[in-house]
Amino acid sequence: MKNFLSGLLLIAAITLTSCFAHYDESTETKIPQSVIVLISDGTGISQITALRYSRDDFAFFRFPVVGLFTTHALDQLITDSAA
């Protein structure tokens, strides 16, 4: 019984010490050097417009440049985005 309580106390101590997070108290804000934006396959104007209607404050709409492109196969009428 004594070993059980000692083990339980040890597990509780390890659990409690791992719950405390270390916070950096520096006041400087660092500007990222580069940002990677992942856009899923099949995202088109209609999905982006639906996003704009549902959330007007989305960071995606503050980009200064917008570009569109299409993909097509050289010798097929039907293709997918991996062409």
Image (cartoon, rainbow, N blue to C red):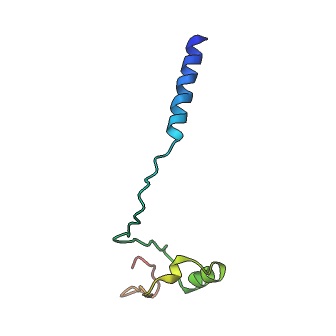
Q: In which quarter of the image is the N terminus?
A: top right
Quarter-of-image position of residue 49: bottom right
Residue 15 pos. (x, y %)? 54, 34
Residue 14 seen anywhere in this rendered image of the structure = yes
Residue at (46, 51) in percent of width and height: 23
Q: Is residue 37 above or below residue 22?
A: below
Residue at (59, 79) in percent of width and height: 57
Quarter-of-image position of residue 79: bottom left
Q: Quadrant of the C terminus?
A: bottom left
Residue 43 seen anywhere in this rendered image of the structure = no
Residue at (47, 74) in percent of width and height: 39
Residue 25 pos. (x, y %)? 44, 54
- Residue at the extreme right: 54
- Residue at the extreme left: 33
In the image, is 1 to the left or to the right of 73? right
Residue 26 pos. (x, y %)? 41, 58
Q: Is residue 12 above or below residue 51?
A: above
In the image, is 31 to the left or to the right of 17? left
Residue at (61, 82) in percent of width and height: 52
Residue 67 pos. (x, y %)? 43, 88
Q: How many numbered marks, from 0 up?
A: 0
Q: Which of 25 and 21 is in front in this view?
A: 25
